[in-house]
Image (tube, rainbow, N blue to C red):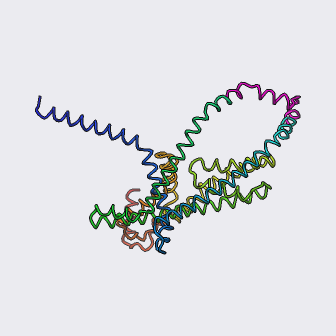
Amino acid sequence: MPGWLPRAMVLALALYGCFQLGSWAFYQLVGLLTNVLIAFFLALAIEPAVSRMAVRGIRRGLATFLVFLAVLVFGAGFVVLLGSMLAGQIVDMVEEFPKYLDSVISWVNDTFHTELSRVEVQDSLLHSDWLQRYVQNSATGVLDVSTTVLGGLFRLLTIFLFSFYFAADGPRLRRALCSVLPPSRQTEVLRAWEIAVDKTGGYIYSRGLMALISGAAHYVLLVVLGVPYAPALAVWVGLVSQFIPTIGTYLAGALPMLIAFTVDPWYALWVLGFVVVYQQFENYVLQPKLTSKTVDIHPAVAFGSVVAGTALMGAVGALIAIPAVATLQAFLGAYVKRYDVTDDPRVHGGHRSHRGEPVLSRVLRTVRRRRRG
């Protein structure tokens, strides 16, 4: 046996053990790393507001606190308003449910020539096996729901704490990062940081603009249908559909459908159809154009980045994919050497013209064609 073989085997086993240990540690910390990544982009989003307040003489810690306080106050007020509205509508639905049930039973009797009654339907529902199983499963799942809610609150608190430190100690963090790099690398890091702030701000601006357009469109629909609380519902649709990835559209459309159902069941179908049509218009027309202008990336790249981000990191990846790709594209663009494009019609989608070509070249080309023929 060669003398180097035992040492090579020990080294290979050590490398394999380090790889397994690193994989285990990454798997255990992937949740924390995701929260830190979200907090970093959230800090980049509020960086312009904090910097403006700091320039005016307000300490960065206090400025960051004021920005977060404004966001929390707005969010809490919006949730309380929607909660009270939704509670009132649920009470109205419960009171009007017998009328809805009578109308449905009358339609079934007239259409299928049956003789159903509300008492029979209620008794069959109350004594059905699936309802009893549903109640039992709901009772046993209360603990799981409570655990999920507490976990979500803890994760939200973690994100806010990290984002607060990133925004409040931004200059200190940049100095600490640049202190371990040579001057040439320090310039690159600072430029990348500035680009990230600019692109993230542009992305938030585009999302806010799309939320405004979406809210206005749904407000017009709700007013035409005569659905109550149209302004609050329009704000709900605009914010939730734009700032909650993946499931935001369904959450945003469910509440207006529920309120519209209390007015007329057919209005709920109208709202559903409008939500589906508008979502397709937004995904394929509005969002790519706005994103390409505010974040300065091609619509196809924006769409592909969202798909890739969703595949890699789920809802979080869908939310941060566009600003991340825009930052990377702008940063790498500084290192790509560009040349003047030749004045060729094919560049603009046309065909090459032979006008202005020397006479000798045209004669030679004609001779070659005849020889081939």
Viewed as shown, does residue 208 lie left or right of 269?
A: left
Q: Quadrant of the C terminus?
A: bottom left
Magenta range is: 107-133
Residue 201 is a magenta residue: no
Q: Is residue 351 visible?
A: no
Q: Residue at (52%, 50%) from the top-left corner?
A: 156
**Is residue 155 in view from this perspective?**
yes
In this rendering, would 298 be left or right of 19?
A: right
Judge by depth and name the residue closer to the eye, 121 or 164: 164
Q: In which quarter of the image is residue 368?
A: bottom left
Q: Point out residue 322 in the picture as x, y percentages from the top left corner.
A: 49, 57
Q: Where is residue 316 in the image (x, y as percent from the top left)?
A: 50, 49
Find residue 355 and report its image quarter. bottom left
Residue 84 position within the rendered picture, expressed as x and y whole percent measured from the top left? 72, 51
145 vs 33, left or right, is right
The residue located at (83%, 43%) in the rendering is: 96
| Quarter occupied by the N terminus | top left
In the rendering, at what x and y percent does residue 211 appear? 62, 59
Please name whichever residue, 88 or 258, is drawn nearer the observer in this view of the structure: 88
